[in-house]
Image (cartoon, coloured by chain):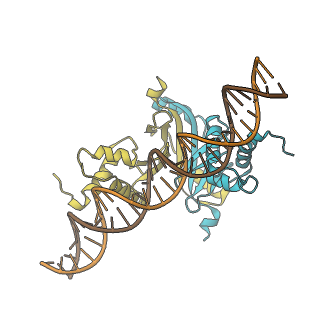
Chain colours: A cyan, B yellow, C orange, D brown
Amino acid sequence: MESSPKQFQKRNAILDCLRQTERHPSAEMIHDMLRPTHPDISLATVYRNLAWFKANGMIRSLGTVNGIERFDANTQPHVHFICTCCDAVLDLPQIEVPRNLGDTAERSAGCRVKECQLTFFGLCGSCANS
Amino acid sequence: MESSPKQFQKRNAILDCLRQTERHPSAEMIHDMLRPTHPDISLATVYRNLAWFKANGMIRSLGTVNGIERFDANTQPHVHFICTCCDAVLDLPQIEVPRNLGDTAERSAGCRVKECQLTFFGLCGSCANS
DNA sequence: AACTAAATGCAAATAATTCTCATTTTCCTA
DNA sequence: TAGGAAAATGAGAATTATTTGCATTTAGTT
């Protein structure tokens, strides 16, 4: 069942955890989610591996929500919604990320655009009904 | 020359400072900019007033750049460019903030959209040429 | 003038993240 | 296959941006 070498069990567990959730979790959320299966995993290891995945382009950071950094295993451009009440982060796959705008930005500001992030803020379904 | 009551001199100075700069500064940047004219201003006062302005809708937070919160006195929707090399934040007034997308988001995710933030990341002009 | 409420400075407290260092695990090679 | 370099990890200390408590000053009100 467990085929990955022991050295990478935790690294893989962190990446798998991030890939299998829709929650766009923080380091601490990942740590909590992993605790049942990896009771001895350290929070520092989660932080370290997230930084490593990010540096290697395997994951993306969404920036901070309420001062806490949130991560996404989906590195394809897509749109997010952040609930300002419960801090939930949702994907909005129905909305197109505007293309060609990056070119306009480069021309008008004389910069080299690498990525684009479109985020909506507001109240999620459950927070809006309460 | 100085007509504002002493009680609000610092509060006004903070808001003026934010309104007069293009730098989208952090609390500490504002504190540094104010030091020449207000040598006795406290960093806590800057933080407190920024929180107050934000809570009262007078300014906006852009979120954090490299772990540091940045502010904008322009509360009108507009697009930003963030240099991942020097942390500069620029306005991109040439680019339209997509309208009507908020409606699509509300319909597809069942949420109540309040704002929208479009940000480009990359290298600014000077960082790209060096 | 006296009283209340707001604003401020200072320093301590908080909390997310990073770092240090000793230990373990893996990988490479002779 | 042993031995050593390199990478990964845990634990806790250190760092740092931000917030808070408290005493003091300032403004507004009667």
**Labels in figure, total:** 0
Tell me where residue B90 appears, x and y as whole percent.
44, 38
Name the residue nearer the viewer: A76 or D24.
Answer: D24
Residue at x 31% of width, y 52% of height: B14
Up-down relation of residue A87 to residue A3 (above or below):
below
Tell me where residue B56 appears, x and y as whole percent.
40, 61
Residue at x 63% of width, y 50% of height: A43
Residue B104 shows in the view: no
Q: Residue furthest right?
A: A1
Left or right: residue A51 versus residue B127 is: right
Tell me where residue B46 appears, x and y as whole percent.
34, 53
Name the residue nearer the viewer: A5 or B84.
Answer: A5
Left or right: residue C18 versus residue D9 is: left
Q: Quadrant of residue A113?
A: top right
Residue A125 shows in the view: yes
Tell me where residue A72 appears, x and y as whole percent.
65, 46
Residue at x 70% of width, y 46% of height: A14
